[in-house]
Image: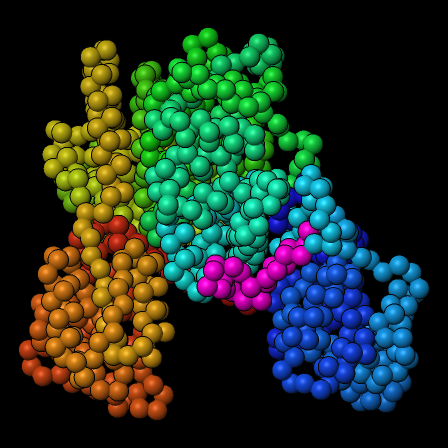
Amino acid sequence: MEEVGAHQTGVYTSSASEGVQVYQGVPGAEEGRHWTDDEVRALLCVWADRRVRESLKSTLHNKYIFQEISGQMQRTFGVVRNWKQCRTKYKNLKYDYKMAKSTHAARGGRSSPGKYMKFFHEVEAILLDRGLEEGSLGMKRRLYDGGQAPTASESEVVIEIDNYDNSDHYDANGNVDSKLTAADQPAADQLQVVTVSDTGRNWSDQEVRALIQVWSDERVRRQLESSTRKRDVFTQISNRLMQQGIERDWKQCHTKYKNLKYLYRSLQKGKTDDADPKRLMRYYGEVDAIMNRRARGSHTLHRLDLRRIAMPEGEAHSASEADERSCRPESIRLVATPQERQATEAGSSHHLRPWQPQDTSLGPRESSPTHGDAFSTGRGRKRKADDEDTVPAPVKKTAENVNIKEEQTHVPIIEVHSVCSMADRDAHAQTQFCGVSKRNMATTQELSIGKKLNEGKTKQIFEIVDQPGLVLVQSKDQITAGNAVRKDQMEGKAAIANKTTSCVFELLQESGIKTAFVRQHSDTAFVAAHCEMIPIEWVCRRVATGSFLKRNPGVKEGYRFSPLKMEMFFKDDANNDPQWSEEQLLEAGFRPGGLAIGRCEVDIMSRSTVAIFEILEKAWATQNCTLVDMKIEFGVNVKTQEIVLADVIDNDSWRLWPAGDRSQQKDKQVYRDLKEVTPEAMQMVKRNFEWVSERVKLLLEPKASGRVVVLMGSTSDMAHCEKIKKACASYGVPCVLRVTSAHKGPDETLRIKAEYEGDGVPTVFVAVAGRSNGLGPVMSGNTAYPVVNCPPVSPDWGSQDVWSSLRLPSGLGCSTVLSPDAAAQFAAQIFGLSDHLVWSKLRASMLNTWVALKVADKKLQACSL
């Protein structure tokens, strides 16, 4: 069966995959994909009907006429266009005809007017009623030269998706304003579902699964339900997919989302039919889980339903049945088959296909399958043929365990036993990629691991065959010091380091820092975007210690750097990583990923290092830990040529002093300082690493909750207030909208104030009142909470009205800002004093603004030169 939502220009086969744009610069574009020639011919044939032409001439309110035109195009030609698109195209054809006539006359009639417009003569025949005695039949002969016009297949169900608006419209019963028609009722196994174009190439199974995965996130779902203008939400979704190596713009994501949701609702509406909805819609179960999330509960959905996204249909269905009977967390054990062991011994690449939970969060505080070490290099990956997909055997559950087995012999058998993920002792070492992260409650996609791209002292980098542009970063149970002069094995170190790195990158991505991290794959590995590394270690110091004291005699340990001290070191183990200056870096002429490292790039890395350190310093302060210093590395996204934070950040990367006391240090310096490596000493080092990995999870939790309460004088200020609410959401600050008037109902205004003062939640009041602003001053005079005036300034009286917010009696301290974004930012700065997550978003926003200006200046200089 054809994939639901795949790109179709109609229900008939057409060799022209791209439409022909037959107008330019006309207001009211066709709101979606371009019209193909066959679609325009179909419209012209229906338009040529005498009854249609007379109806269009005799009425001004012609919606029902274009609804009939739309239906006739579907029934006769199999062209799926809604009435609004037909009306817009009709107007554009008339406009183009007039423009072509004017251009022809202006140039003296030296050439045919048909030169300036496709289908000119056909439109002229309709408008002037020439040669159309036979109506639609005559137009068919003109357009198809007497041949057979394309028609809709009798065995196809036509699903019309309205792409006209940027929001979803449902009636009172929850039905979308579209319709489901069928030429005939075919057998259930012959149905083919056809949807409108996603304005581009087909969506592959992998892309649809990734979209559903992002859609399933609780915050994304809430934003989609609460917003009518969803462009910003789908822009975030598009960015999230980009970091998984999937290139889809926000319009394509929006269209695919609407197609999936509409098809689901259409099948729900007709669910009493004999046909199984899952046979008509490939991802019916996953979409059903999302749409019914409130009833099922967020936690259950993540644990039971979403893990099916990365599974084939049969396996997902069986797994869901098993999960309904057993809701305990389960781990995965990979058992290598004899064929796999033989292939491994022969040196072949390993194909590992365990499903694993991953973080699907998005938004101000979600790890985005969310920013960039190893991103995709390929554009436009195509969906594999259905006959290439693996069809697994059903899952069989016993009283003791669940066995999930696929037919293909090269795929390991997955045995689900307990909370912990372990590799079979008899399995080959290279098959030991496994684990269920307790934090990541959604599925990762099955990975086909290819060749080893690189190996360092503590990690290995593997190519992911089925996800071009992504790599798997596998940690090792090895700890080193002094450029591997000292090297020891520490059991469990790989899982500890991977957990620490994943949490740190998640925190940074939630803040808005661009990183190479994509998602945690297992206990010991994570997926990252493919980057070419810049061979420089950037070291940022708050407190003088370690090698800095040796290189700078006379500076006492504990000296505090304000501002931060920046250093850089060239990665060269043979020469003990020498320190470099900016001038040396500029003269080195590095070109990783084709990007020349110049002044702009060096400044971006330097600024980013400071911002990253400050964000992590602020976060660790919530745990009463001093971040003394840290080292990070950057890479260039080979796909976007963008500099991103890459490599890893774990307990090898920094110095941490609890309570600012060096004697309590918890970082790798303890291992460096060992005079003799003994089992007892290594246990002490491991306990320190575990302590850090447990504490780092707490960095993702807010330390204080706050809210913004926006008080508007009337509902006419709603648009202004919605902008404030949207800006607050970008900082992770909840926002509540209320309507009250301090002039007309002061008692109610004070009652609302008392309501929010009484629950003890830190609150910032924002007063939105036009004309004479009484809200802000009244609130400021009766509450100790911060009050911000943000009046909606009108063009007529704005310069006079604003004085009611500026000239206040003594004893009132409310501030006044005119921009909704600035009001939200001001409130976020107040909450950022006690909430490190809000502060981090503010800090990252400052960095991103600076970087954008720097890049814009570089591009302008390049254009000038």
Give the prevailing secondary structure in the magenta stretch. Answer: loop
- Number of numbered callouts drawn: 0
Q: Position of residue 174 (x, y in %)?
A: 48, 59
Please name the residue shown 52% across and 25% down the image.
353
Q: Tell which residue pokes out farthest to the right in this image.
A: 146
Please name the residue shown 67% across and 57% down the image.
181
Q: Is residue 359 left or right of residue 472?
A: left
**Quarter of the image that includes the N terminus:** top right
Q: Is residue 695 above or below residue 52?
A: above
Residue 817 drawn in magenta: no
Q: Is residue 239 left or right of residue 674?
A: right
Q: Position of residue 703 (x, y in %)?
A: 19, 47
**Magenta stretch, residue numbers:** 157-181
Q: Is residue 299 left or right of residue 145?
A: left
Foreground of the two, 672 or 622: 622
Q: Is residue 573 above or below residue 292?
A: above
Please name the residue shown 57% across and 9% down the image.
338
**Quarter of the image that includes the C terminus:** bottom right
Q: Position of residue 757 (x, y in %)?
A: 12, 63
What sort of colour scheme is used for the picture?
A: rainbow
* Residue 385 visible at all: yes
Please name the residue shown 31% across and 77% down the image.
715
* Residue 120 visible at all: no
Foreground of the two, 633 or 529: 529
